[in-house]
Image: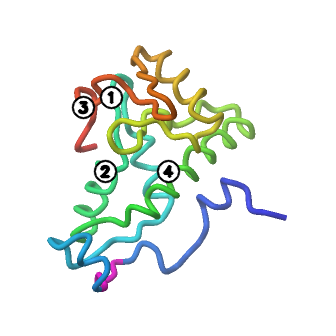
Amino acid sequence: MPKTWIEKLEARDKDLPKIVELDKKMKKRYPEARTMLVPHPRQVYEIMARVPRGNLITVNEIRDILAKKFGADITCPLTTGIFITIAANAAEELVQQTGEPPIPWWRTLRSKGELNDKAPGGKENHARLLEEEGFQIIRKGKKWKVANYENFVLAVI
């Protein structure tokens, strides 16, 4: 039986978080960096949980916050993106199990203010929840984003 989203969030991986040295390929992509943090999903969840109403955060701000917290030059973009999806879906599972309100996962955006098509209920649900909080969604083909998202993004939590 596959793991639930909550089980993925709570995975007891004793190796995470960890800081790794960048290999040659990654150094070409991030020439200013020497070390990369690979966070634990729970750490991403905790940042997402603290975004207040009226504000937003993107994957890039989450990565910056985590890198600073752990003393790494950068945070892994791939695992952070995966962990955002895990956190959002785990939040919805917790609502179903406990009836408690979810963490505001919908306030977390992809880079450039784009909505996450892997969010619970897809982009449509992500857009609906943001619009309920007063954000305007711009729909251009497959890319949906929050209008003027830069004005609402938190850099520090």
The chief SS type of the magenta part is strand
Q: Nearer the viewer, residue 94 or 20?
A: 20
Looking at the image, is 50 positioned above or below residue 80? above
- Disc number placed over residue 84 in the picture, else none: 4
Q: Split into 4 quadrants, where in the image is the C terminus?
A: top left
Name the residue nearer the viewer: 18 or 123: 123
The answer to which of marks 2 and 3 sits earlier in the sequence is 2
Q: Within 10 Å of the Cα at label 3, are there few (<14), some (14-19), or many (20+) other Cα atoms? A: some
Kindly report the distance in space between the C-alpha atoms of the residues bearing marks 2 and 1. 15 Å
In percent of the image, x 30 and y 29: which residue is there? 149
Say what amino acid the circle numbered 3 marks. Answer: Glu
Residue at position x 54%, y 30% from top? 126
- Percent across and percent down for residue 83 are 51, 57
Could you tell me residue 21's position as x and y percent?
29, 84
Q: Is residue 84 above or below residue 29?
A: above
**Amino acid residing under circle 2:** Asn
Quadrant hosting residue 137 = top left
SS of the residue under disc 3: helix
**Callout 4 secondary element:** helix
The numbered mark at residue 55 is 1
Q: Which residue is mark 3?
A: 150
Residue at 43% x, 43% y is 48
Magenta residues, as a range? 19-23
From the image, tell me which residue sits under label 2. Answer: 60
The amino acid type, in three-letter code, at marker 1 is Asn
- Magenta stretch holds residue 22: yes
Q: Nearer the viewer, residue 52 or 2?
A: 2
Q: Earlier in the sequence, mark 3 or mark 1?
A: 1
Could you give the CA–CA distance between mark 1 and mark 4, rounded to whole angstroms?
17 Å
